[in-house]
Structure formats: structure tokens, C-alpha cells
Amino acid sequence: MSLKYTTVLGEEGLVQMAAAAGPLAAVTALAAAEDAGVGGHAIVLDRLVQADPAAWTADCCLAAGCLPSPW
């Protein structure tokens, strides 16, 4: 099985957005992308969190609430 490791939004752009405007802005953009919910988004989200764990864990419930439900 092949997984899509990219999204229509560039990972680097999302990392920069998270650094400049905060994780909520980045996760909102990720959730609003035209390919929202594909497997690559989970990978990109993981990399965003790894780039700045403290920022992402400060309000993880709010950030998680912006993501589309897998169910």
C-alpha cells in the first residue's frame, strides 16, 4: 500500500505558519485543505508537533478539535 506523505499545503509552509501564528493557525489550515483527512496529514501533523512540542501540547484539545474526525 502506498501512503501519501505530502499534502496540498507544503509541510515547510505549515511549520513556518505554526511558528509565526501558532499551532491553531497551522492545524486550521491543514484541516481546511482540499485533501484534508488523507494519510499524509497525520504524518505532517506529527512533524509539526515534533518541530515545537511545547507549543502544540499547550492546548492540544483545541488543536485536535480543529481536525476532521476519522469516523
Image: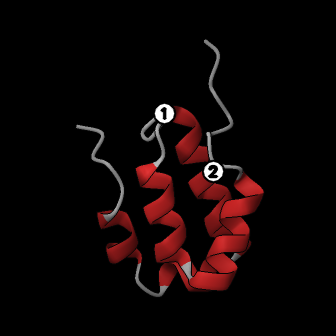
Q: Observer-nearest residue: 9 or 4?
A: 9
Looking at the image, is 43 positioned above or below residue 53?
Answer: above
Quarter location, residue 3: top right
Q: Amino acid at mark 2?
A: Val
Of the two numbered discs 2 and 1 on the same chain, state the one appearing first in sequence. Answer: 1
Looking at the image, is 45 positioned above or below residue 3?
Answer: below
Quarter location, residue 60: bottom left
Quarter location, residue 41: top right
Residue lying at the far top of the rendered structure: 1
Give the image location of residue 34, x and y in percent: 46, 38
Report how far apart the C-alphas of labels 2 and 1 lie in the structure: 10 Å
- Colour style of the rendered protein structure: secondary structure
Helix, strand or loop status at disc 2:
helix
Give the image location of residue 61, x and y in percent: 32, 74
Q: Residue at x 36, y 65 (%)?
A: 64
Mark 2 — residue?
A: 44
Mark 1 — residue?
A: 38
Q: Quadrant of the C terminus?
A: top left
Q: Which mark is residue 25?
A: none
